[in-house]
Image (cartoon, helix red, strand yellow):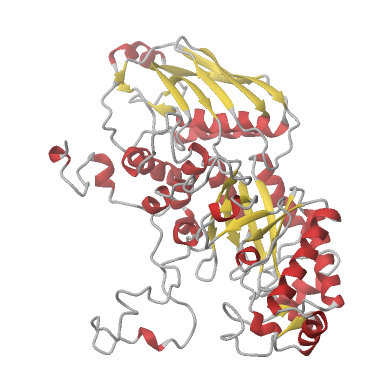
Amino acid sequence: MKLLSLVAACALVSASVEAKTFLFPIPQEVAWSGTTAVLSDKFTFQGIQNKHLQKAADRYIDLIKKERWVPISVSTDNTTTTPTNNELQGISFEVADNDAKVDLGVDESYTLTVPELGGFATVKAKTWIGALRSLETFSQMVEADEEDNLVAHTANINDAPTYVHRGILMDTSRNYFPVKDILRTLEAQSYNKMNVLHWHATDSQSWPLELKSLPEISKEGAYSAKEVYTAEDVQTIIKFAEERGIRVVIEIDMPAHTASIVESHPDAMICTDVFWGPYAAEPPAGQLNPVSDYAHDIVKTIAKDVSEAFPDSVYHTGGDEINTKCWDLNEDVQAYKAKNNMTTLEVWFEWTTNFLEYVKTDLKKRPMLWEDPIRDGGDYEKNTIVQTWLSPPSTYTAQGYDVVVSNFDYFYLDCGHGGWVGLDERYHSPTQTETPEDVHNYAGNAGSWCGPFKTWQRIYGYDMTKGIEKDHPGKVLGGELAMWAEQTGPTVIDGRLWPRSASAAEMYWSGSYDRAGERRTVKQSSERFYDWVYRLQARGINAEPVQPKYCATHPNACDLNDPSLEA
């Protein structure tokens, strides 16, 4: 079918549609014109001088034609507009920098004008990445009318992200994810204007990442030969991400969370032969020897290999959940402490200082680490990016660190699914009812240390600015949702991530407050969010339902309180 039939063009003047589309994440400034223009069947793009932007333009026009979106949610905004038969012939791009690198802090701002009189929409952006973001916005401005013709709502949009780091952490060690699932996650991220895939590639359970200089680690430490990411796989993921303006920040978590190295390099490890309970955050136990030159050489080789494969300027060093009891089992560690009059924690701080310096000086990367060594008393160069999961971000911005927020009680998407360790008798409820002695299955978290489940509403309610003062020498770079994979795999990844990640994506892009200083709320965003869930599903992302479809098609019918009684 052509985008506009002659009969439909003549009938347009008698039809009416809602004046606004459900944009998600909401742009910073939108001025709707009150008209729609019809997409020409010869819709073209002009002024593109970047190969990634050209591929994106091709993808998006194909998506628009295939999607032919008709909103599911019924808006409570009754403003309507009369469609016109003005044809929108294409988009003209004006981009200042067509060679910008996808990296921390790159400019992603854009302006988008879809004119009332038709002709060409215009996009102005400082970089091709900003222009790419405008294509997602434009795709959401296009809908199919009652005759199945594609019409674009006309508007002037001025948009830019509030935060430069907007990501998802994907853990591929606890359970393996095929490359296709990682690519689909990246696609969904691009729809939500997210720009970071934090790849937590390895951990104690398995080592699926192939290394050029130490291939034996994945050969021995992966679950199987089929559950390994080859150098070709890595480049496929990085290329796919770059084409969508997404950074891939690699994390090789050390010196804890490394037990999988024992299979190939046992002499670099400590306490891998003990039951995990007293010595590790979760099974199996095992940490790198912090005073072994042999272990240090392995760490440096791994970091060098990985930093060469991943072009991003940031290298995530891990650094969380050290268990000092593990190290205290080792005679060499005890001798080192005695010789240097150090505590076990101070040995950890020294190890971290040396590794961060290696990353900065030798690898020429900006180091990033979990908050643990600072929270427990360490002090490091302030160029280090701190990722929080326990403390408020202001704890570290006040000290001069830049911060990425991943606080577990809002952004850990694995929470609330019960426990997973074996032979846990607490799940047996003798009376099958809550008692003071039996709360585990009732008022407790049922084995999920970070329960309850983090709903999209809870995530949306997080205030990224809380406690951050203007005189803090550090700043909040943005945030990440963490998809730890103890109970997640390729069969459920879409539903665990989406649509909850979209809730955070709007906060990361649009901000907790609009430009007038008004707090963004669940109430204001819900109609757009609900429709966005259905649109993600239509785009091939198996987002988890968040309510009966009835609620989306009957505004306010599912509200907690009777809206007619509200003042």
User: In the image, residue 161 lies at what x, y percent?
Assistant: 55, 36
- Tell me if residue 281 comes above or below residue 233 in the rendering: below
Q: Is residue 340 left or right of residue 462?
A: right
User: In the image, residue 510 lies at what x, y percent?
Assistant: 48, 37
- Tell me if residue 177 comes above or below residue 134 in the rendering: below
Corner quadrant of residue 163: top right
Can residue 245 be seen? yes
What residue is rendered at 75% in x and 47% in y?
313
User: In the image, residue 361 lies at what x, y percent?
Assistant: 85, 54
Q: Is residue 158 left or right of residue 74?
A: right
Q: Using the image as rendered, state which of residue 279 and residue 525 is in the foreground.
A: 279
Corner quadrant of residue 439: bottom left
The quarter of the image holding the C terminus is top left
The quarter of the image holding the N terminus is top left
What residue is rendered at 39% in x and 52% in y?
456
Q: Using the image as rendered, state which of residue 208 and residue 194 is in the foreground.
A: 194
- Tell me if residue 320 comes above or below residue 15 in the rendering: below
Q: How many marks?
A: 0
User: In the image, residue 495 lies at what x, y percent?
Assistant: 45, 57
Can residue 181 be seen? no
Corner quadrant of residue 552: top left
Q: Is residue 171 left or right of residue 29?
A: right
